[in-house]
Image (cartoon, rainbow, N blue to C red):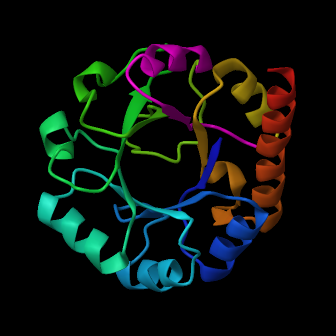
Amino acid sequence: MLIKICGIKDMNIAHIAVEAGADALGFVFAPSPRQVAPQVAKKIIQSLPETIMKVGVFVNASISTVRDIANYCALTTLQFHGQENSYYCQQFSLPIIKVIKITKSGSFLSEPGSYQGAVRLFLADTYQKGKEGGTGKAFPWQKVDSIKKYGSVILAGGLRVDNVYQALSITQPWGVDVSSGVETDGTKDSKKIRKFIQEVQRWKNEFSSTE
């Protein structure tokens, strides 16, 4: 069960997340309240253990821009949140996470099958008009099963301390991704990060014991 904390902009929060048990940290390089400058991301990444997945989040960026930032920051994984197609995803040597946006009614904005073989992982997130991510809204979680046919799925979208256990019980994904759900007034909250990770680990331990 991979645990990813996204929207990292602060060295201290990055280390708190890692110490609490996060496996991956996400750095947003697209226009967003959580956008981080490559220079800042690079300093944070240089201070992290090698075992931590360093994920760069992009939205419809040019291939050259993604490559330049990935090389400069020493990213280990790329995450695409826009309308990037299968051909685009195949232009990179790093592992790819492709976001599949799901509406409240349960329909997909892009077909996961079209990316089969081009991406390493899918990230299931909630569609909200005018926002590319960090909506804080949930989608019908059972729809994750329709994506699993094409690859492993990271669950995102509206996850919080009080609902992540239930979400995991319904979807049993490969991993979870949270951003706004561990924030207070738009800022990462260390207490929420720790509690969120504890809930994921509690579910993981209980689920493992029933297998």
Q: Which residues are magenta?
A: 141-160
Determine the residue positioned at 43% across, 73% down.
36
In depth, the one of 98 and 106 nearer the eye is: 98
x%, y% of residue 115?
Answer: 26, 29
The quarter of the image holding the N terminus is: top right
The quarter of the image holding the C terminus is: top right
Quadrant location of residue 183? bottom right
x%, y% of residue 175?
Answer: 59, 39
- When the figure is inspected, residue 87 is found, relative to residue 188, above or below; the finding is above
Determine the residue positioned at 56% across, 84% down.
47
Determine the residue positioned at 30% across, 69% down.
70
Quadrant location of residue 121? top left
53 displayed left or right of 49: left
- When the figure is inspected, residue 36 is found, relative to residue 85, above or below; the finding is below
x%, y% of residue 103?
Answer: 45, 22
Determine the residue positioned at 47% across, 30% down.
152
Q: Examine the structure image and report whether residue 142 is included in the region drawn in magenta.
A: yes
In depth, the one of 203 and 49 nearer the eye is: 49
74 displayed left or right of 84: right
Q: Is residue 80 visible?
A: no
Q: How many circles with numbers are drawn on the protein? A: 0
Q: Is residue 21 visible?
A: yes
Q: Examine the structure image and report whether residue 22 is included in the region drawn in magenta.
A: no
